[in-house]
Image (spheres, grey):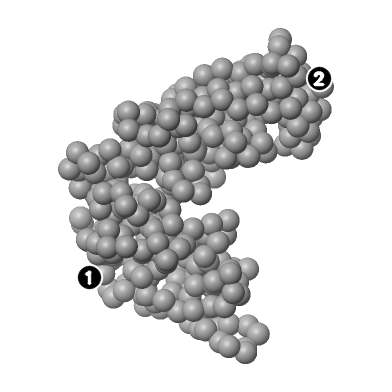
Amino acid sequence: MKRGFKIKAAVLVIALAFSVLSGCTPARQKKPIPRRITTEPTISLYVNETGQVKRIKIEEYIKGVVAAEMEPTWPVNALAAQAILARTFTLKQMKDKGGVPQHNTDASTSVEEFQAYDPTKINDNVRRAVEITRGEVIKYRGDYVNAWYSACDGGVEASAVEGLGYKKEKTPYINAGARDGCLAVTVPENKKWTVSFPAETVRAAVKKTTGVDPGNLSAGNVSIAKRGPSGRAEVIKIGNAGVSGTALRLALGNDKMRSTFLDSISIRNGNLVLSGKGYGHGVGMCQWGAKKMAVQGKKPEDIIRFYFKDVTIEKLWK
């Protein structure tokens, strides 16, 4: 879970392009596809491990993404909700950004560039999950949503601004404030965690992030200056500087500072000590929450609609 761990038919109008795999041609040519998609597309996938490009049916690609982004042994309906998110993310990236422009392909196997992908982890659960949601994507007023998800939202879903610092566009479909009870089923390290960072490391991170040297840190000059609607730390006071919680987490390491859902912040023995709950940005679908709902018998579409409000789930191809 690298990033932290998602039917009314409508016309799909997208400007997708498919890359043509070429063994020796320096520049791969793209050709347009029909504006209305009624059959399963084939996409070009850049394999980062080998530098090769292969053409693959999108549903086969989604299997490799689901297997990499969520524990493959989890309930089928949780995996199926993840499949809907992965499919939506893929098509939105292709529509908005042309896929992965640096490789001139539609997708990439790199989690930093696109989504995690590991076909070796595909099992019967994953195959079934992708099959029962075949062609399904999430839209809000005719457009693909930002298909965000995280491992554990700490029990409360964050808004895009609060959890990600995302202000590029409004995202009214994010059901911020929704309570899913994920802490009751998640692993201990997500229920409560504490991490310590040397003060000089924090000082350097803040200076790099904000351009302001916060100066020496002491017990009296570190605090949570502003909390968002869900209770996450939106602005953190570090010495003489104020830094967004999301920016500080990125600078210190997403795997170390597990979330911005902080319970406390202090200085101890020359170290900045943070305590909190959850794992990831908390925006969109919570994977542990999805697992909890799947165990309760919720359908994948119901899980999606819990985390994304006022959306339609459309089946683009059979």
Q: Nearer the viewer, residue 6 or 314?
A: 6
Q: Quadrant of residue 67?
A: bottom left
Q: Name the residue furthest top.
A: 220
Quarter where residue 199 is shown: top right
Element under label 2?
A: loop
Left or right position of 270 against 53: right
Quick check: 177 above or below 169?
above
Residue 158's spot in the image, x, y percent? Answer: 44, 32
Q: Residues within 10 Å of mark 2 (few under 14, many from 20)?
A: few
The quadrant where residue 181 appears:
top left
Q: Along the polypeptide, which appears first: circle 1 or circle 2?
A: 2
Residue at 49% in and 72% down: 45
Viewed as shown, does residue 58 lie left or right of 240?
left
**Which quarter shows the C terminus?**
bottom left
Q: Amino acid at mark 2?
A: Asn
Q: Dot 1: few (<14), some (14–19), or many (≥20) neighbours within 10 Å?
A: few
Q: Which type of secondary structure does the marked residue at label 1 adopt?
A: loop
- The residues bearing labels 1 and 2 have C-alpha atoms spaced at a distance of 61 Å
Q: How many marks?
A: 2
Question: Going by the image, does 30 lie left or right of 247?
Answer: left
Task: Tell me the tag on residue 128.
Answer: none
Task: Give how far across and how far down residue 189 sits, in percent.
Answer: 47, 32
Image coordinates for residue 61, horizontal then vertical, percent: 40, 68
Q: Amino acid at mark 1?
A: Lys
Dot 1 corresponds to which residue? Answer: 318
- Mark 1 vs 2: CB contact within 8 A: no
* Depicted 198 relative to depicted 82: above or below: above
Residue positioned 48% across, 75% down in the render: 44
Residue where numbered disc 2 is placed: 216
Report if residue 3 is visible in the image.
yes
Relative image position of residue 110 (x, y in whole percent):
55, 61
